[in-house]
Amino acid sequence: MRRALRENALCALLALAGCAALAWLGLYGAGWNDYEVEAQPSFDALVHGHLARFLQLAPVYGGSLIERSPFALLPGLWGGGALAVYRAVAVPCLLATAVLAVVLVAAMRSEGKPRLARGLVLALLVASPISLLALEVGHPEELLGGALCLGAILLAAAGDVSRRRALAAGVLLGLAIANKQWALLAAGPVLLPLPASRRLACCAAALAVAALIEAPLLVAATGTYVHASSTAAAPGSGIFQPWQVWWFLGHHGPLVHGLFGEAKPGYRTEPSWTSTLSHPLVLLAGLAVPFVLWLRRRPERLTGEAALLLFALVMVLRCVLDTWDIGYYMVPALFALTAWEARTGGRAGNRPPVLALAVTVLAWLSFSWLPPRISPDAQAATFLAWSLPLAALLAWRLWAIVPARAGGGLRAAVSPARALRRGALGLPVQETTARPFGSAVSTSQPSARTTTRSSMRTPSRSGR
């Protein structure tokens, strides 16, 4: 224990320093952001001792406010005001990213990954400009949700998953779902890496924790909270951002105004059907992709690498399909990409997280740097120019690293020809499957050269 603390002390200090810098840059005030309208009235009621009012005024992500409510009470110890509360309730979100960063960097260090790769992973998790954007807009809970989901996936993908570990993964998933409902999209990436015998326990823990946190909101706000949640699932709010796939289906007309009355020159008016289709389609994609992988791989578990990549893909699809998409929606996807590159094994795992770094830069350009400089149509085109290829790349990579289950009617993981070539090169050979007369026969070694000649064409030169 003492050795672990000593080895991780510097990393923990750097993570805390990154979080402090992010807080100093992004938590300068609550005015003119979503926190002022959505969360501040509820926290003000809590600080003044009005618990029922705190629950009644909570926004649709009221579970996040409950989880962070102890931190809202801390400024009262020294007489802090509303600004101190605003900063205090962001602390657990920043600390969650710091813990995630320390865990991943410690694993990379134990695997002998280079310092540059470890440093970039640390920076992308605790000091990303997209995380800064989440703080500036007033949504630190997005950082908390991303860290909780990643923690649940890492626990579920461990080599030996005990019942206690499966319950812990379920608890983290339940906290993430209560924090913000989009975390339901993490259910597949958390459950598929678990052994089949542990999935029920994980589901039960997640449902119990989420229900325990959401119950006070359902009781105190009665139909108001339920109505707000259903409206978020299939909204008709008129929010129509340029950074999504439906943008060019809208039409130019009268000057568009935002929710707070600000003019938005160049913005399109959304078709009436997109607002009701967008969020259900996000949920459908989040269920369909894991279901396809389950059919392809069952009954075997997904690897941790595949689970992280699956979560990254699902969260990128969320951004592409959601008419509400805004910069901080990319936070969970960027966390997942960073964790995936940090955990990638083999020679490729020694390189820095270049994909996560590139996507972070592209997201910052799309959501922060370009909007004051180009038209909304150009913003939409720029976003789609990199987000759609990114989704395709992640889907292709995920399909490649999740081989079909052996003997299950789908393509075998490694063909005999490929097994022979790998054996000739001295590489490890994965399990191969032959199907004579419909029965599956598995072997962990490549077939002999004399045997192979009787059933397939033998390469003229070894290794080709």
Image (spheres, helix red, strand yellow):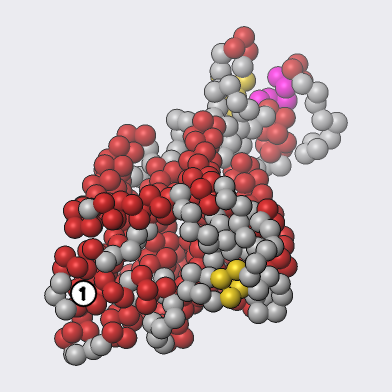
Q: Residue at x 53, y 70 (%)?
A: 258
306 relative to 20, above or below: above
Residue at the limit of the structure toward the bottom, as seen here: 79
Residue 252 vs residue 316, the one in the foreground: 252
The quadrant in which residue 357 appears is: bottom right
> Three-letter amino acid code at disc 1?
Ala
Q: Is residue 447 magenta?
A: yes
Residue at the limit of the structure toward the left, as seen here: 49
Residue 460 vs residue 209, the one in the foreground: 209
Residue at the limit of the structure toward the right, as seen here: 460
Position in image of residue 447 (x %, y %) = 66, 25
Position in image of residue 207 (x %, y %) = 28, 45
Position in image of residue 204 (x %, y %) = 26, 42
**Secondary structure beneath label 1:** helix
309 relative to 238, above or below: above
Q: Residue at x 34, y 61 (%)?
A: 61
Q: Residue at x 51, y 48 (%)?
A: 276
Q: Which quadrant of the figure contains the C terminus?
A: top right
The quadrant in which residue 372 appears is: bottom right
User: Bounds of the magenta span?
Assistant: 446-452
Q: Is residue 108 magenta?
A: no
Q: Which residue is mark 1?
A: 45
